[in-house]
Image: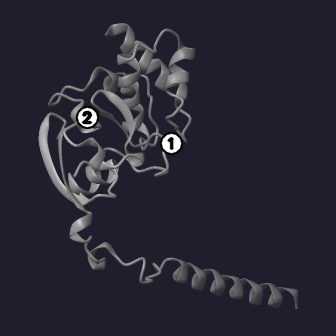
């Protein structure tokens, strides 16, 4: 009797899990959440032409004036190295350099940086030669899943340029805006420390 009950319960659970998984996997298509290909284009009065120097190259794009710098880079300029993490400025995965200052690209509008010089992770290496900090990240195993790595490297480059590498504690303080869910902080600090000493 108890075996029959257990089998029936297991069957019901499996059916429930299978059904709920199938339903949860479907996107909800409401009028305010259409796929990008079906969404209405922005009205002409909301469009702006943005001209930037990105990784040393002049780039121009016409975007909705509410477009973040992050979305401009990823969606319009095909530079996916800058990651979208929290999209709220809390994780630092989207860090880029704007006129040599680190910026959370998700928190700033593209139109605010008309004529600016933007450097992304794609712009650090020189051909096959990695930036010294990129090489140090490899040598010190400063990455695990790699998702936060572009933002960590960009913030680290700025940290070195700003002169905030007097001690491991100082590096940790000035890198505190960049989160690593894998917990590679010690190795990240070592990579920045080494690069700063060799600069």
Q: Earlier in the sequence, mark 2 or mark 1?
A: 1
Residue ID at (48%, 44%)? 89
Question: Is 113 positioned to the left or the right of 19 in the image?
Answer: left
Q: In the image shown, does 187 or 168 lie closer to the viewer?
A: 168
Decide if residue 80 is in sight here.
Answer: no
> Circle 1 sits on which residue?
91
> Circle 2 sits on which residue?
119
Circle 1: element type: loop
- On the image, the x and y values in percent for residue 26 come to 47, 80
Residue ID at (39%, 26%)? 137
Few, some or many residues within 10 Å of mark 2 (<14, 14–19, 20+) = many
Quarter of the image where one finds residue 198? top left
- On the image, the x and y values in percent for residue 46 come to 27, 64
Q: Quadrant of the N terminus?
A: bottom right
Question: Is 174 positioned to the left or the right of 1 in the image?
Answer: left
How has the structure been colored for display? one colour
- On the image, the x and y values in percent for residue 179 come to 52, 37
Quarter of the image where one finds residue 135? top left
Residue ID at (87%, 86%)? 2
- Compared to residue 19, the image places residue 89 above or below, namely above
Residue ID at (45%, 43%)? 145
């Amino acid at each position: 009797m108890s075996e029959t009950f257990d089998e029936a319960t297991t069957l019901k659970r499996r059916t429930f899990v299978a059904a709920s998984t199938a339903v949860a996997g479907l996107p909800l298509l409401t009028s305010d959440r259409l796929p990008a290909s079906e969404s209405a284009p922005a009205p002409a009065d909301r469009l702006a032409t943005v001209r930037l120097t990105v990784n040393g190259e002049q780039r121009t794009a016409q975007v909705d004036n509410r477009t973040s710098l992050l979305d401009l880079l990823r969606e319009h300029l095909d530079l996916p190295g800058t990651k979208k993490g929290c999209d709220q400025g809390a994780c630092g995965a989207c860090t880029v350099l704007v006129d040599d200052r680190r910026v959370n690209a998700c928190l700033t509008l593209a139109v605010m940086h008309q004529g600016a010089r933007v450097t992304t992770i794609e712009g650090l290496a020189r051909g096959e030669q990695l930036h010294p900090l990129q090489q140090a990240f490899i040598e010190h195993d400063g990455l695990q899943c790699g998702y936060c790595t572009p933002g960590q490297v960009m913030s680290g480059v700025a940290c070195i340029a700003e002169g905030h590498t007097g001690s491991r504690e100082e590096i940790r303080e000035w890198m505190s805006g960049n989160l690593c869910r894998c917990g590679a902080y010690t190795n990240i600090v070592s990579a920045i420390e080494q690069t700063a000493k060799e600069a």
